[in-house]
Image (cartoon, grey):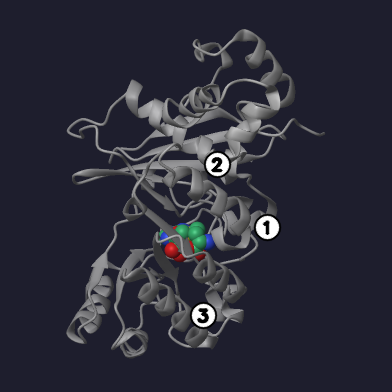
Amino acid sequence: MTHKPLLRSMVPAEFAALAAAAGVPAYRGRQLLAWLFKHGALSWDRMSNLPHSWRDLLSATYDLTGLHLQERQLAADRTRKYLFQLRDGHTIESVIIPMAGHITFCLSTQVGCAMACTFCATARGGLVRHLEAGEIIEQILHLRSDLAADPVPGQGNRQANVVFMGMGEPLDNWQAVARSLQTMMAEDGMAMSRRRIQISTSGPAAGLQRLIAASPGVGLTLSLGGSTDEERRKVMPVPGRTTLQEALQLAAKYGHQTGRRITIAWVLIEGQTDGLDQAARLAQLLTGRDFQVNLIPLNPLDDSRLEPSSERAVQDFQKVLTDAGVPTFIRASGGRDIAAACGQLRRRRQ
Ligand code: SAH
């Protein structure tokens, strides 16, 4: 099945040429841009100041939307989880995570994932396909419109943070992720600050090199899961092919380039990744580097015997790191009652 291209897969800089090719004045291109990215129009009808003739022409060539909301779940802790159906029938998840003082949108970059991490629900079905830039951007628009219709109490109108921590490995789909970043940060796109954007990666070397070359200035989280190459390969078999030293060196290089502290994400699985010897080795790896560690107790899957570390084990692990001078934070995994860990909702529906 072939579809029309998604209009929102184009980046703002390409719209002047689009208007010119259609023979409409340049300001029409800017009006269209505002509808697409600022107002987040999900129907052509909303673009009331654009001539019908141009809207008809555009809709004959492009699809305006590629996501259809299939399910919305609200957790006791106010985490919201969304399951979207794509035009080809595949599904992806996005999450809204309300935190003290701000809201975070968690986006998917692929349908499925090729990384095969043992603890991750998305890994189960393997990689199905990359998302296009328009499919990444549209997640933000649906989440925004849901928030506008049903605001999180106590949260003002501040712009949400965006993290690429949903389904998929963002650096394996760099082309689309880079385009979505352009649209998110462009003044005539979504005008988001790079400070509010964070890419989370399992650290493929080629992907990190592309990120360094493009230097978008957004934040970087490196998911580690092991303090030696061997340990890491056990829980993250594909990412484990890049050596720890190489992944850390490349992440550090990106950190220097952007002047931003790199975050290490460490999933705590009982008996597998919560050893105090592992904490000590991790501390050693990070000493002298501007890194911080986020400890994430495992959000357990329904089909595996992996268990989260006990609260005590989490605190002991943290103490080894903080005693060694590594800033370390415990990140409670939100929305446990609604299966908010990466890929769990999609799995449940299949
Ligand atoms: N592929 C990218 C982004 C998606 S995973 C990456 O690896 O970073 C985003 C984060 O969710 C990773 O840090 C991963 O370790 C974590 N994660 C995945 N499944 C989890 C689970 N069941 N419980 C806790 N954290 C999980």
Residue found at x 41% / y 65%: 220
Could you say where residue 250 lies in the image, as x and y percent from the top left? 48, 79
Q: Earlier in the sequence, mark 1 or mark 3?
A: 1
Measure the C-alpha gap from mark 3 to mark 2. 41 Å
Secondary structure category for the residue under label 2: helix
Classify residue 129 as left or right of residue 264.
Answer: right
Q: Are marks 1 and 2 in contact (CB under 8 Å)?
A: no
Residue depth check, mark 3 versus mark 2: number of the one nearer the observer: 2
Judge by depth and name the residue closer to the eye, 263 or 126.
Answer: 263
Look at the image and tell me in which quarter the N terminus lies: top right
Residue found at x 62% / y 62%: 172
Secondary structure category for the residue under label 1: loop
Judge by depth and name the residue closer to the eye, 34 or 120.
Answer: 34
Whether residue 313 is visible here, answered yes or no, is yes
Give the mark count: 3
Q: Earlier in the sequence, mark 1 or mark 2?
A: 2
Classify residue 50 as left or right of residue 114.
Answer: left
Measure the C-alpha gap from mark 1 to mark 3. 19 Å
Q: Earlier in the sequence, mark 3 or mark 2?
A: 2
Tag shown at residue 232: 3
Q: Are marks 1 and 3 in contact (CB under 8 Å)?
A: no
Residue found at x 27% / y 78%: 317
Tag shown at residue 13: 2
Tag shown at residue 342: none
Residue, far right? 1
Residue found at x 68% / y 20%: 59
Judge by depth and name the residue closer to the eye, 284 or 51.
Answer: 51
Tag shown at residue 126: 1
Looking at the image, residue 109 lies above or below residue 59? below
Mark 1: amino acid: Gly
